[in-house]
Amino acid sequence: MLTFNFYSPEEEINSSLFQEKDIRVFIKRDDKIHPYISGNKWRKLKYSLEHARILQKNRLVTFGGAWSNHLLATAAAGAQFGFQTFAFVRGETVDNPVLSLCKIFGMELCFVDRKAYKEKAQLFEKHFGTDDQAYFIDEGGYGPLAAKGISELLTELQREYSAIFCACGTGTTLAGLIQGLATNNKTQLHGIPVLKGGDFIYDELRCLGVDPDKAILHTDYHFGGYAKTKPELIDFCKEFTQATGILIEPTYTGKLFYGLYDLIKQDYFPPKSKVLLIHTGGLTGLLGMLDKF
Ligand SMILES: *Cc1c(COP(=O)(O)O)cnc(C)c1O
């Protein structure tokens, strides 16, 4: 119903490390879907937007931190598909390039302290309880409709992989991949949580109605926690980008690619493995980290 033709090819990358270990590595370029409705965020929003349209609700109300890729995606998608957009932003009032872009796309922002932010349903009720145009979209797009959107990624793949990897924030993307892969047991799914204590993703997968045993989480690549970095990660992002021409950032895809290279070095994959990484986009996150490079 909401038509939007996009391009997300699978591209092989090369390195002497892959040659030495005799494995092949491909990237699903979801970062090419759209510069601002980026990566997994378009897939995650698609069915919520369709649902809102069916219910004839014209105002999207959502939640995120001050550098949220989801807020920017919602703002840009709202402008493209004719919805007003409103966001509750976690924490004290700030200005940054991502929030400025949100405002350019027409999003209205309301900053709320961390305690109030936690009660999302309550915030929605208080501000939009009597607004029959308002449609609730959870933080990061989290939810079953988002997982359904992600599951369609699998139908686009050109070849069969021994392993597919994605970065995990809320775990919705990984849940969608599990859903989409349902009957294929030749491919092992892997998630790299970008938050500390990433085992909570197993519970999120259960909440999203998929079998957590279908995925393996590698919980040691968070570099101290969400949006935390170390010089080693920054160096890796630079070296990777310079060697491949593919931009990555430290919050999500940097940790994902770092983790993959580390696992390859440890001979985690048998020779002849074909590994696919989902490039989930989010490159505007770099704008908040430029001083680290
Ligand atoms: C939001 C985001 C993720 C996390 O996706 P979840 O579905 O919340 O796990 C991963 N990568 C990028 C670039 C993102 O913006």
Image (spheres, helix red, strand yellow):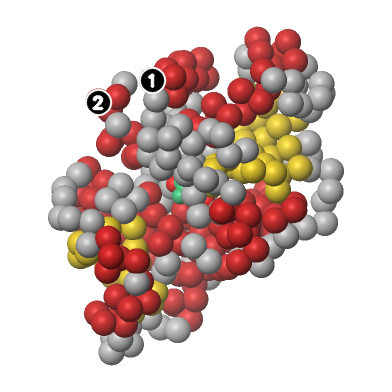
Cβ of mark 2 under 8 A from ligand 1: no
Residue 266, x across and y down, in percent: 69, 20
Q: Residue at x 16, y 50 (%)?
A: 94
Please state if 235 lies on the left or on the right of 15 as rendered. left
Q: As shown in the figure, which amino acid type bears the numbered disc 2?
A: Asp
Question: Mark 2 sits on what residue?
Answer: 291
Please state if 21 lies on the left or on the right of 50 as rendered. right
Residue 39 in view in this figure: no
Q: CA distance from mark 1 to mark 2?
A: 12 Å
- Quarter of the image for residue 80 reads bottom left
Q: Residue at x 20, y 49 (%)?
A: 100
Q: Residue at x 54, y 63 (%)?
A: 146
Q: Residue furthest front?
A: 197
Question: Mark 1 sits on what residue?
Answer: 231
Q: As shown in the figure, which amino acid type bears the numbered disc 1?
A: Pro
Considering the numbered disc 2 on the image, is that residue within a helix, a strand or a loop?
helix
Tell me if mark 2 has few (under 14), some (14-19) or many (20+) residues whose alpha carbon lies within 10 angstroms of its own: few
The disc, 1 or 2, on the residue closer to the chain's N-terminal end is: 1
- Quarter of the image for residue 193 reads top right
Considering the numbered disc 1 on the image, is that residue within a helix, a strand or a loop?
helix
The one nearer the camera, 91 or 42, is: 91
Residue 201, x across and y down, in percent: 58, 53
Tell me if mark 1 has few (under 14), some (14-19) or many (20+) residues whose alpha carbon lies within 10 angstroms of its own: few
The one nearer the camera, 186 or 121, is: 121
